Image (cartoon, rainbow, N blue to C red):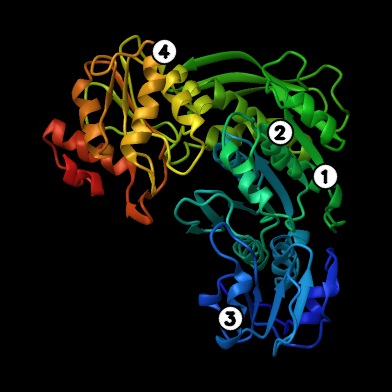
Amino acid sequence: MNTKPTIPVTLTILLNQFLLKVLAGKADGTRITGIAIDNRLVQTGNLFVAMKGGSADGHDFIQDAIQRGAAAVVGDQTISGLPVPYIQVENSRQALSWLAAAFHGYPGRKLTVIGVTGTDGKTTTCNLLYQILLAAGLKAGLISTVNAVIGDEILDTGFHVTTPDAPEVQSYLARMVAAGLTHVVLETTSHGWAQYRVDACEFDIGVITNITHEHLDQHGSFENYLAAKARLFQSLEKTSPKPQGNPRLSVLNRDDSSYETLSRIAPEPQVCYGLNTSADIRADSIRYSPQGIRFEAVSKANASAKWGTFRVPVNSPLVGEFNVSNCLAALTAAVCGLGLDPDIAANGVGAMPGVPGRMERIELGQPFTAIVDFAHTPNALRVAIQTVRKMTNKKVIVIFGSAGLRDREKRRMMAEVAAELADVSILTAEDPRSESLDLILEEMATGARSRGGKEEKTFWRIPDRGEAIRFGLRLAGQGDIVMACGKGHEQSMCFETTEYPWDDRIAMRAALSELMGVAGPRMPYLPTQVKQ
């Protein structure tokens, strides 16, 4: 579907409703055919937005962008003498979001936009909300770190992405408007907020899942990480008036440690959900089984007249206490934010079969349970292991790694969690990038030993992830659970600067087929295989 504007876009049009300060330069009638942030991808007539990155500064490539056909340039440095218009702003990365939105005619203003953020559970909560909207008969879209769903079209959002870059997000929103959609659920990460990728999305409802130890290497401190997440709620006050109305609701997790801080930061109206009896919307009569979860969603007796008092049964094929929380978050946003019927919301929750790579079972007739999960933080790994513990009284074998060039403290913490809760831990590769995999595994092994782990008795180091999965399956007996964590839905693994095609689900099927002597896929290649 073409999302090019139907009327010519000029520099004047892009800056007409620009909310940020322009330090120098004047808009004129220069025609703009698109927006580019990579000088190598500039096409004739593009606006090139120069931004400083981690390893390069886009301002150094302005001349190249112009030679490739850039019609105008936006940056945040003082520059003169260019042969094309140059607009200087205070922060070109933040400006990019508003310029991309303007190029597409501010599509967020034509949609009801629900944003979901948090450390764990974002993708699941987004998919639950999406299913609820469909159950209510609404024309809804979805943008997550797994994919974008626009009607019958499903688009991969790429390798190792957090929130897509601003031009992509606005393009997806524009395609949704063109397709006649009215609502969108948008997963937003801390990186996305810190880098202003979703600033111009015009959110109506903000939802938090939880905030735990993650990405502190990127944000510097837990306080900075929380502040990045909080920007979703702060943005609600800046959302433009919309013809369809503005719910403007902050949906907070009453059980999470972030609640006290966010309840002071987030604008009113607020609603909180959780297992806590003081939550506005809580779960009662919870029952867990390997087949899923069942509970009743109950509103407070003194609930707001806007959504009234209700008690509805919720049945979901998802497993674990953390998914009770995810289901509550989605139901709360739908009922309290959009005014949907609680029974319809519960039906939508029950209609979601699962999210790829989230507690996904791999079955090839083996006498034990094999699971692939995305758990890649200490808290997520803890919750995942605790969840599968309720599914068996036999051994739990967990296979996981910790990424290179990311939060080093997490390596020790994840190994500690596994040593405490799992029967067997297998430490392996997970995107080592340019770091030494052996050193990463040593840091993890130190964490395992600190919690009583015995190498080659309760934990092993196996650098090649494919061989680690094979080994874990060979250790499994009747009724055991083998769980590969950390990659989930992801489609690649990074060694040095190369992304090798990799999918834990394919790897698990390959290893199971070898073990069971049945037909199956081949084990994907990783460079560590040559060391075996």
The outermost residue toward the bottom is 83
Which mark is first along the chain, 1 or 2? 2
Circles 1 and 3 in contact, beta carbons < 8 Å = no
Q: Judge by depth and name the residue closer to the eye, 5 or 385.
A: 385
Q: Secondary structure at mark 3?
A: helix
Name which residue type carries label 4: Arg
Q: Secondary structure at mark 2?
A: helix
Circles 3 and 4 in contact, beta carbons < 8 Å = no
Percent x, y for residue 313?
62, 22
Q: Judge by depth and name the residue closer to the eye, 232 or 142.
A: 232
Q: CA distance from mark 1 to mark 3?
A: 42 Å
Q: Find disc 2 in the rendering and name its residue.
A: 223
Name which residue type carries label 1: Pro
Q: Which mark is residue 385?
A: none
Name which residue type carries label 2: Glu
Q: Is residue 45 above or below residue 217?
A: below
Local crowd at mark 3 within 10 Å, few (<14), some, or many (≥20)?
A: many
Residue 505 seen: yes
Q: Which mark is residue 65?
A: 3
Q: Find disc 1 in the rendering and name its residue.
A: 247
Residue shown at the point (70%, 55%) measured from the top left: 196
Residue shown at the point (61%, 28%) measured from the top left: 212
Q: Quadrant of residue 61?
A: bottom right
Local crowd at mark 4 within 10 Å, few (<14), some, or many (≥20)?
A: some
- Between disc 4 and disc 1, the foreground one is 4
Residue 524 seen: no
Which mark is first along the chain, 4 or 3? 3
Name which residue type carries label 3: Ala
Q: Find disc 4 in the rendering and name its residue.
A: 451
- Seen in the image, is 419 located left or right of residue 248? left
Q: Judge by depth and name the residue closer to the eye, 129 or 121.
A: 121
